[in-house]
Image (cartoon, rainbow, N blue to C red):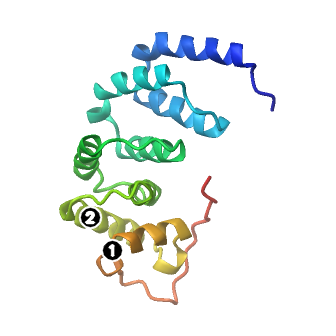
Amino acid sequence: ISYPSDLLWRKLESMTIHTMKELDDVSLCTLLRSYVSLGKQPAWEVLGAWQQRLENTLNTMSPSLLADLLKSLVKLSLAPDEKWLMEWCAIFERRSRSSSLQTLEDALWSLAALQYTPSPRFLAAWAEAFKTAMENNRIQIADLKKDTLWAIQSFNLGKLISTKWGPKYSSQRRRSKRN
């Protein structure tokens, strides 16, 4: 893959800024994830426009988009402020009861990577949703990704997510390597 020249890249970013208000939730997250995939840091102007647009849509995002958003920010080394993280946690907590295992893994890993400790209420709700997702998928602790285990340990959640599944059960789920 060859990357566009700096001039072309600046033009693309300028176009992005002007079309930002037309993007839906999925497109906003895809835009940020694209920067991660390309290994490019967004210009401050793009981040400013993106943040302004995001303020109006954060409350409408699904748990998977919320987790994807936070994971992308972490991968770009962009740390939201505490107020924003508190709001993110409140929204995610309300919506995450039946989230996928991947969504829950990404959310917790991102918070741990940011070294942000959410409220005990958030952690309890996350653990309950995670335990349910593990049981529904017949996943045991030993089957979890290294990043997920690290995040669980970071918040001392091991006892909260222990399940009835013993060592004789093994996961049928294939693991994909984190980017």
- The vertical placement of 37 against 27, above or below, is below
Identify which residue is drawn at 35% across, 41% down: 62
User: Which is more toward the observer, 23 or 74?
Assistant: 74
Q: Secondary structure at mark 2?
A: helix
**Is residue 121 shown left or right of residue 11?**
left
Find disc 2 in the rendering and name its residue.
123
Label whose residue precedes the other's in the sequence (2 or 1): 2
Task: Say which of 78 and 142 sits in front.
Answer: 78
Identify the residue at image location x=52%, y=90%.
Answer: 168
Amino acid under label 2? Leu
Q: Which type of secondary structure does the marked residue at label 1 adopt?
A: loop
Question: Between marks 2 and 1, how big is the CA–CA gap?
Answer: 8 Å
Let me know if residue 145 appears in the view. Answer: no
Q: Position of residue 52 (x, y in %)?
A: 34, 22
| Figure quadrant of residue 13 | top right
- Residue linked to disc 1: 157
Q: Which residue is painted at 29% across and 60% down in the image?
A: 117
Identify the residue at image location x=29%, y=48%: 92
**Residue placed most toward the observer, 48 or 22:** 48
Residue 53 image offset from top left, x and y in percent: 36, 22
Pointer 2 and pointer 1: residues touching (CB < 8 Å)?
A: yes
- Does 16 sit left or right of 50 as displayed? right
Q: Position of residue 39 (x, y in %)?
A: 65, 38
Q: Is residue 79 found left or right of 6 in the rendered image?
A: left
